[in-house]
Amino acid sequence: MLLIHDIRADKEGIIARLAKRGKDFTDLVNRALTLDDKRKSTQVELDTILAESNKISKEIGQLFAHKKIEEANAMKAKTGELKEKSNELSEQLKSVETDLLEVLYQIPNAPGAAVPAGKSEADNKIIFEHGEKPNLTQKQPHWELCEKYNLIDFELGVKITGAGFPVYRGKGARLQRALINWFLDKGRDAGFEEIQPPILVNEASGIGTGQLPDKEGQMYHMEVDNLYAIPTGEVPITNIYRDVIVKEADFPIKNCGHSPCFRREAGSYGKDVRGLNRLHQFDKVEIVQVVHPDKSYETLEEMSSYVQGLLKDLGLQYRVLLLCGGDTGFASAMTYDMEVWSAAQEMWLEVSSVSNFETFQANRLKLRFKNSESKNEYAHTLNGSALALPRIMASILENFQTPDGIIVPEVLRPYCGFDVID
């Protein structure tokens, strides 16, 4: 959530940055400022009445002490009027604060200076490409390879749950587990503390990281308990720091964690959703950092390099995109996407997004630190997939296929216990 102080300090600048998303947010910004003005004036009026009421209460005590009963009772009647007025103002203040919060919840993060303007993925900027596209002697898509080698059973998942809930088995399950363990070990070696988070979160956690109310329709909701299945490990891991004042000396705070993730993916259809390309349940290793505001963009570059290092170690050809404003997530100020080339499908598959949220999440979370002047200041939060499993699995199966089997990347062989899937 944008800080109202920042909106007020640079209204035109914020509106211009928001315009990079391909929409005009002027009306919402003006509505927020109008409500904040009303909030301030109501607060001032309430404070004035409370101060007057306190003053009169003290005077009443003195009058009673001096046996001036009639005067004291007359003033008590006035305090009653003031109390009634203060109650009315308190209710008005709560209503205005609620309205202001609802408006601020509708305003996405303002894209950073380096983010290009644009409305869709067509306006994203390719900033780097690594490796050469594989030249395969055969080009079977991963869903055919999964059936051929009995790695993943998509139809069995449909029987048990529904489409988008595959069953991994045999060497497919072992390769999946190998990837998870390798990603976690790489995170540990890079200084990330491993977290095993809950996979259900409450509403406050969803609001804290920006999934609610923006992506409510994409989350699986358990209405009886009002809990949500997590769409990403970012949600529970980042919420560790909700309502926390961290120590500046502890920066950077680095966490990583593996979790299953759940997304309804409403409206998804076509060839891009076949096999592992788009699932309702999938596994992911997430990295999260809480850093000093002065260091967040430097940290974003470091996290991008870290994810790229994983892809290089796996021997996968990839590219890095700087997302335009219209394709940048609601809560993000700047995002890099990493895409791997699928040689069999002849298309790019997104395998990671690395984002800087600046203070957007911290404001919702009330995640602060004491700065050098001992004043509370909002931290910056970042997160990234390191990595999402389904499309990495698909890319490995497709890009390393041979007529004699699928070659397992060398870094994974100690984890899965075999060199070839045949």
Image: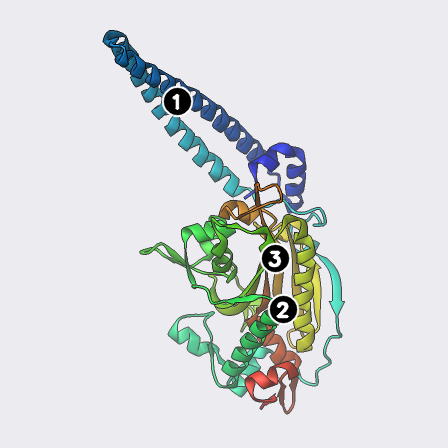
Q: Is residue 73 visible?
A: yes
**Residue plotted at (60% across, 36% down):** 7
Residue, disc 1: 50
- Within 10 Å of the Cα at label 3, are there few (<14), some (14-19), or many (20+) other Cα atoms? some
Residue 63 placement (x, y as % from top left) = 29, 11
Q: Secondary structure at mark 3?
A: loop
Q: Is residue 140 visible?
A: no
Q: CA distance from mark 2 to mark 3?
A: 12 Å
User: From the viewer's perspective, is residue 419 above or below residue 66?
Assistant: below
Which badge, 2 or 3, comes first in the chain's sequence?
Answer: 2
Q: Which mark is residue 156?
A: none
Report the amino acid beneath label 3: Pro
Left or right of 13, for residue 421:
left
Placement of the C terminus among the 4 image quadrants: bottom right
Q: Which mark is residue 252?
A: 3
Left or right of 263, for residue 115:
right
**Residue plotted at (47% across, 77% down):** 154
Q: Secondary structure at mark 1?
A: helix
User: From the viewer's perspective, is residue 76 above or below residue 284?
Assistant: above
Q: CA distance from mark 3 to mark 1?
A: 43 Å
Identify the residue at the far front of this view: 66
Residue 198 placement (x, y as % from top left) = 43, 63
**Residue plotted at (41% across, 21% down):** 51
Residue 82 placement (x, y as % from top left) = 34, 18
Q: Are marks 2 and 1 in contact (CB under 8 Å)?
A: no
Residue 133 placement (x, y as % from top left) = 73, 75
In the foreground, 33 or 142: 33
Residue, disc 2: 190
Which badge, 3 or 1, comes first in the chain's sequence?
Answer: 1
User: From the viewer's perspective, is residue 95 above or below residue 217?
Assistant: above
Report the amino acid beneath label 1: Leu
- Within 10 Å of the Cα at label 1, are there few (<14), some (14-19), or many (20+) other Cα atoms? some
